[in-house]
Amino acid sequence: MPQLTVNLDVDKIRELVFQLPSKDFIQLAREIEERLETFEMMQLAESGFEEWDATEELMRDPAMREDVEEGRAQAARGEGRSWREVQRSVRD
């Protein structure tokens, strides 16, 4: 069976969508919203995995791991500065 290929750009799709009857437009909007929520969750998950990978990579570095452990020990002893103090010192 022959196939027909139609090239549509976003503007043409938008134009066609706005021509839909109200009932179909509302249904399509709901389906797009559901798809968007899934897409956003996937992006968040991907971002989380990237951070996790970066943390694992840093913790495999012996010098970095030693620095992190020293920082934790300093915090446990009540040494160090708050994040706000660090931010202020960087701005100055």
Image (cartoon, helix red, strand yellow):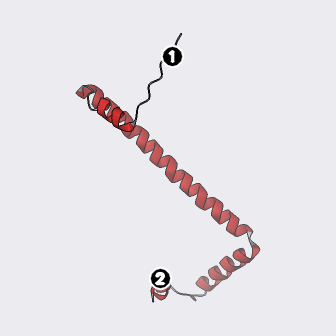
Q: Residue furthest top?
A: 1
Q: Residues within 10 Å of mark 2 (few under 14, many from 20)?
A: few
Quarter location, residue 60: bottom right
**Could you tell whether 53 is left or right of 87 in the image?**
right
Q: Say what secondary structure mark 2 lies in.
A: helix
Residue 87 badge: 2
* Amino acid residing under circle 2: Gln
**Could you tell whether 37 is left or right of 54 in the image?**
left
Residue bearing mark 1: 3
Residue 32: percent from left, percent from top: 38, 37
**Could you tell whether 45 is left or right of 60 in the image?**
left
* Amino acid residing under circle 1: Gln
Residue 17: percent from left, percent from top: 31, 31
Q: CA distance from mark 1 to mark 2?
A: 61 Å
Q: Residues within 10 Å of mark 1 (few under 14, many from 20)?
A: few
Q: Nearer the viewer, mark 1 or mark 2?
A: 1
How many badges with numbers are in the image?
2
Residue 36 badge: none
Residue at 65%, 59% in the rendered image? 53
Q: Earlier in the sequence, mark 1 or mark 2?
A: 1
Residue at 40%, 35% in the rendered image? 9
Residue at 34%, 37% in the rendered image? 11
Residue 45: percent from left, percent from top: 54, 51
Residue at 27%, 27% in the rendered image? 20
Residue 16 vertical position relative to residue 82 in the rendered view, above or below: above
Residue 50 vertical position relative to residue 59 in the rendered view, above or below: above
Q: Residue furthest left?
A: 22
Quarter location, residue 62: bottom right
Q: Say what secondary structure mark 1 lies in.
A: loop
Residue 31: percent from left, percent from top: 38, 34
